[in-house]
Amino acid sequence: MNVQPLLAVTALALLSVSCNSGPTPPEPGTPAFLWNASKQTYRDGDFAKTSDNLSEILRGDNDYAARARVWQVMLTAGMAQGYSELATAYDAGAKANRANPMPFRKQVTDLRTRGGRAALDLTEAVHDFVAKDQSADVLLAFAFPAGSVAKPGSYNKVYAGMTLQESEAQGLQSEMAQHGAVLALCELAGSPGDSAKVLDKFKAGEVKLPRATYLYGAAKLLYDNSELFGSNKLDQPQRLTVMCEEALKALKGVPENKDTKDLTAKIQAALKKIKKGPGV
């Protein structure tokens, strides 16, 4: 009997088993798969897709949900702020470009709508965080976002009424979401506008924040982004009310100090104005 072919087949079979003995990748649709996908889309700068992936994770209780909630707060606040600021630029651009204001006005409507959706996602994420996460420290299980506290150069072009190529306009939306995310992260970390200080924390390794610091930042982000639903923008007072009320709930978890008193007063003033109705 010639054993050489048999030995060759056996060797190939063993090699195949050896090559396939590594870790099994997560099944598509599972929280682990979605978490890995979130990290990839985040690196790619696709914050909208990252938020969608995190939302899928948050549909149930799993090992990734707590980390996803913390990440979702920063991400959605960043998108809400970035889109809102860009809508303001397009609004100014419509006034500056009197010859062709309509494309600018269309962008204002679209960006405020997208910002409003992100603001609602932010509200839900903060609500769930307050209700479900009681740890003394908050883990930031994501990388420091690409972007800058400063607005990108194309923002000024739009503000001045210059028409952008479609690719540049799309790129600007992504850059503004990243800009907003940096600002949101600084707020959550207790260092408003100081991206260098917050970045140093990420360079040092695992980032954990005191719960009170994170909650105050979340309340501030809710209040700031609630203006998207004001009468001069989306004009949806019920949604503005919900965001302000969630901000007050978040502040209940923060020891009272001058900052919390000042923010509470601003939120209550906004709610009082809504109850009085338009024109007040």
Image (tube, helix red, strand yellow):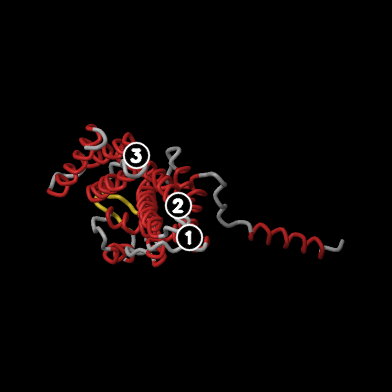
- Could you tell me how far apart the alpha carbons at marks 2 and 3 are, in whole angstroms? 17 Å
* Front position in the image: 153 or 280: 280
Kindly identify the amino acid type of the residue bearing the numbered disc 3.
Asp
Instruction: Name the image quarter holding residue 147.
Output: bottom left
SS for dot 1: helix
Q: Amino acid at mark 2?
A: Gln
Return the x and y of residue 5 as percentages of the image width and height: 82, 63
Disc on the earlier residue, 3 or 1: 1
| Structural distance between the alpha carbons of marks 2 and 1 | 10 Å
Observer-side mark, 2 or 1, equals: 2
Which of 126/109 is in front?
Answer: 109
Whether residue 206 sits left or right of residue 251 in the image: it is right
**What residue did someone put label 2 on?**
107
Point 51% across, 63% down: residue: 165
Query: Can you name the residue that lies furthest to the left here?
Result: 258
What amino acid does circle 1 point to?
Ala
> Which residue is most to the front?
99
**Do tag 2 and tag 1 residues touch (Cβ < 8 Å)?**
yes
Circle 1 sits on which residue?
169
Callout 2 crowding tier (Cα within 10 Å): few <14, some 14–19, many ≥20: some
- Distance, label 3 to label 1, CA atoms, is 26 Å
Picture residue at 86% right of the left edge, 63% below the top: 2
- Residue 180 image offset from top left, x and y in percent: 35, 56
In the picture, the disc for residue 235 is 3
